Image (spheres, grey):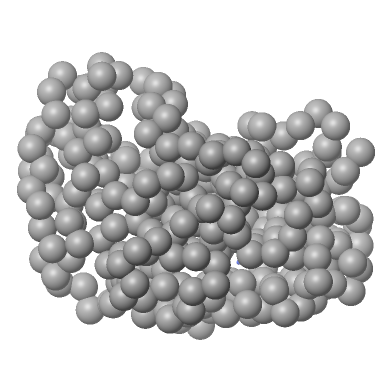
Amino acid sequence: MQKILVTGGSGLLAQQLKTIAPRDWELVFLGHAEFDLTNAGQMAQQLAIRQPQVVINTAAYNLVDRCETEREMSWSVNATGPAALAELCAEKKIPLVHYGTDYVFDGAKKSPYSETDTANPLNHYAAGKFAGEQAVIRASPHHLVLRTSWVFDWHPTQTKTFIHTIMKTAREGRPLKATTDQVSVPTFASDLAQWTLDLLRAGAGGLFHAVNDEGVSRYDWAKIILAEAVKAKLIATAPPVAPVLSSFFNSTMRRPDYTVMSNEKLSRQLGRPLGSWRDGLRKMLAQMK
Ligand SMILES: NC(=O)c1ccc[n+]([C@@H]2O[C@H](COP(=O)([O-])OP(=O)(O)OC[C@H]3O[C@@H](n4cnc5c(N)ncnc54)[C@H](OP(=O)(O)O)[C@@H]3O)[C@@H](O)[C@H]2O)c1
């Protein structure tokens, strides 16, 4: 039986790994307090006690805006933490799975990014996540790094996601606005969890872009969420969504506008299409009832 230690145990992706955990593998989920990426001593101790054959690191500091102001803390979670974990895993020859982000790209390409495209992070979150994934790639010969984007799914306590915000605003009859100039690929966390386990079973390694099919703007994503919510009878009618540009929100932080990643390499590796986020959205809305 494979023993797998999963960090970030209470997060969105970890929750889906828990849901689909195969019976012949033992998955051990450790939360922030028990396995803190900023505490190398604690991580070493946990690895010594738990003796996992694989580590899946889902832990990260994902509040993109807050990373700009909480620079030191976010860097220690997203960059130096994964680097320390990768070194510990390398010492013990434990394969390490780690997750990166579409934000490593600057958006200038305007066609889907492949794994060989050059990264150019525009903000502190992106720089930290890029430093983290590169450290994992360098330190750990048995690494699997999966870059993903706009991860969504149902979760018992995470109720502030983009989908929740759209639904809440619609139900309260407040005006909705969404950006037309931010384009990426929504990715269903259940699918990402399944790809992760399938890759581990196949003994695959390397860097992969792990996203569902089809890029979409925040504006179109919002309209599709509302249309599906009407079909799922969560709301009676879909309210209008006002299209706006990112500049409308007056943020001083630079965000890339186009970060669609191509999933061709992962699809080839798994030998099947990765499927649409539209199916994932329907499944999530069915659980939100
Ligand atoms: N969600 C997205 O849209 C998205 C997009 C691109 C890439 N990704 C990447 O995909 C992976 C999984 O994301 P997710 O959506 O599952 O994230 P998530 O729901 O935010 O979960 C991350 C977990 O990390 C924990 N954490 C924070 N600081 C920690 C620390 N110092 N040590 C240990 N744990 C810590 C958090 O616990 P507390 O809440 O208790 O602090 C949280 O449970 C991450 O690498 C993320 O960067 C996600």
Q: Residue sitting at 22 percent across and 32 percent down? A: 226
From the viewer's perspective, is 228 left or right of 177?
A: right
Q: Residue sitting at 70 percent across and 74 percent down? A: 137
Q: Position of residue 282 (x, y in %)?
A: 38, 27
Seen in the picture, residue 41 relative to 26 is either above or below; the reply is: below
From the viewer's perspective, is 209 left or right of 219?
A: right
Seen in the picture, residue 224 relative to 12 is either above or below; the reply is: above
Q: Quadrant of the N terminus?
A: top right
Q: Position of residue 69 (x, y in %)?
A: 37, 79
Q: Position of residue 114 (x, y in %)?
A: 50, 65
Frontmost residue, 67 versus 53: 53
Q: Residue sitting at 10 percent across and 33 percent down? A: 239
Q: Would you say residue 79 is visible in this rendering?
A: no
Q: Residue sitting at 69 percent across and 73 percent down? A: 136
Number of callouts in the render? 0
From the viewer's perspective, is 69 left or right of 84?
A: left
